[in-house]
């Protein structure tokens, strides 16, 4: 009897440990599978606003607040735009002063907690940029997908699709540039976004199912006059573009790909986000298995879509070593394998999704050179 009770207790303990491990793996996998749109990724530190003066804002000194370029500064109830570090402005040793370009929403006050975001614009193309646009619904397999359409004279359209931690406001960073060069732009919200249908399981699939919404946008563009299309994706949006280029029925209409901060391996991105949440290393394999079980994610599908041998159209990769979410090494490997089709534009000192923010002029000149032959 004592032996039986001991055995039962051991089994119960083992079952409890296993259940706890599975639950922990699910919780860790949430860092990627439930990343909320428009909220900072866990790699982005929270900063404190120490002072606001004429044309300047003083922030907590951090590697993030010292980044070069132009960023949104967001917090609960406000959004502003900050420019480069003002080196000559007086400040304490533990702070950084940046140029304050404008406050676009709410009130920016000392003591507020904030984070830098690649989303410089908020609102829609009319309110943020003064661009005429139409609010449309793209018919998708789960229902209508909200999108902004900014008309242009060319018959080569650009379909933009955002990635992790951002919304369809993020592509407005380059919308003025694309409009200036007369490209019609279709800026898509996809499953899980505000106003779009939810994924059936309520989770992000890091592009592996979301790409079908991009396929729907491609069919919409062709139906309404696009002879050719450039797919332009950030982060998991770049993964969606690769899936679409590999699998969609109208892939012969795709003239080129622009992949900014591309997620080329979902497992590495899941691990990166989990580490940023300070999850213990021993839980990483459990998180990967939990993600596979919850979503059906498998390493072979994205690897197939990103296979250099499968690329058939000119591709611009914009990426850099400062990306803690999507490894730059994978982009370098892809570019090295297909120098005939792939151009890699390296951006130093820029986090995930923020390659434009670090140096907008250089970014847009690279984009102009790539798109000119595709016009």
Image (cartoon, helix red, strand yellow):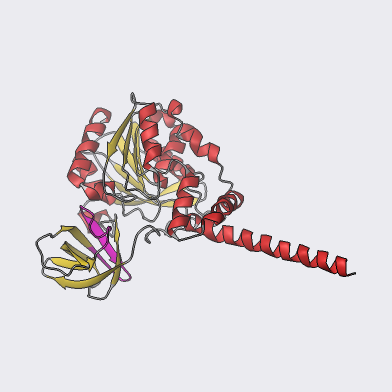
Give yes or no for residue 73 being in the magenta stretch.
yes
Q: Residue at x 42, y 46 (%)?
A: 236
Give yes or no for residue 146 being in the magenta stretch.
no
Give the x, y percent position of residue 251: 43, 31
> In the image as oriented, which residue stretches furthest toward the left?
88
What is the quadrant of residue 102 in the picture?
A: bottom left
> Can residue 284 be spotted in the picture?
yes
> In the image as oriented, which residue stretches furthest toward the top?
340
- Please report the bounds of the magenta region as a residue range: 62-80
Residue 293 horizontal side relative to residue 181, left or right: right
Q: Residue at x 28, y 56 (%)?
A: 124
Residue 302 horizontal side relative to residue 79, left or right: right
Name the quarter where the N terminus is drawn.
bottom right
Q: Is residue 203 above or below residue 149?
A: below
Q: Residue at x 33, y 70 (%)?
A: 76
Give the x, y percent position of residue 189: 40, 51
Q: Is residue 92 above or below residue 264?
A: below
> Can residue 223 be spotted in the picture?
no
Give the x, y percent position of residue 129: 21, 54
Give the x, y percent position of residue 86: 13, 60
């Amino acid at each position: 009897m004592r032996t039986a009770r001991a055995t039962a207790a051991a089994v119960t303990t083992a079952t409890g440990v296993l259940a706890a491990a599975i639950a922990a793996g699910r919780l860790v996998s949430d860092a990627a599978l439930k990343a909320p749109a428009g909220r900072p990724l866990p790699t982005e530190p929270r900063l404190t606003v120490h002072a606001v003066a004429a044309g300047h804002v003083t922030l907590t000194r951090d590697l993030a607040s010292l980044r070069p370029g132009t960023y949104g500064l967001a917090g609960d109830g406000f959004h502003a735009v900050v420019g480069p570090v003002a080196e000559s402005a007086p400040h304490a040793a533990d702070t950084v002063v940046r140029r304050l370009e404008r406050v676009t929403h709410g009130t920016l006050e000392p003591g507020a907690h904030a984070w830098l975001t690649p989303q410089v614009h908020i609102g829609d193309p009319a309110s943020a940029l003064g661009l005429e646009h139409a609010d449309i619904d793209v018919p998708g397999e789960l229902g209508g997908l909200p999108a902004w359409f900014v008309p242009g004279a060319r018959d080569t359209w650009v379909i933009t699709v955002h990635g992790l931690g951002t919304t369809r406001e993020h592509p407005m960073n380059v919308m003025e540039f694309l409009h200036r060069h007369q490209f019609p732009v279709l800026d898509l919200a996809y499953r899980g976004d505000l106003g779009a249908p939810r994924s059936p399981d309520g989770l992000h699939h890091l592009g592996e199912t979301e790409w079908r919404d991009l396929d729907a946008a491609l069919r919409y563009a062709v139906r309404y006059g696009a002879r050719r299309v450039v797919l332009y994706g950030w982060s998991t949006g770049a993964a969606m573009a690769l899936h679409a280029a590999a699998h969609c029925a109208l892939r012969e209409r795709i003239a080129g790909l622009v992949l900014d901060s591309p997620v080329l391996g979902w497992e590495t991105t899941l691990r990166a986000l989990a580490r940023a949440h300070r999850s213990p290393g021993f839980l990483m394999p459990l998180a990967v298995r939990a993600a596979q079980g919850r979503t059906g994610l498998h390493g072979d599908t994205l690897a197939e879509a990103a296979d250099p041998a499968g690329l058939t159209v000119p591709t611009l990769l914009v990426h850099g070593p400062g990306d803690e979410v999507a490894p730059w090494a994978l982009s370098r490997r892809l570019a090295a394998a297909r120098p005939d089709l792939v151009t890699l534009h390296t951006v130093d000192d820029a986090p995930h999704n923020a390659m434009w923010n670090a140096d907008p002029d250089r970014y847009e000149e690279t984009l102009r050179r790539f798109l000119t032959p595709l016009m």
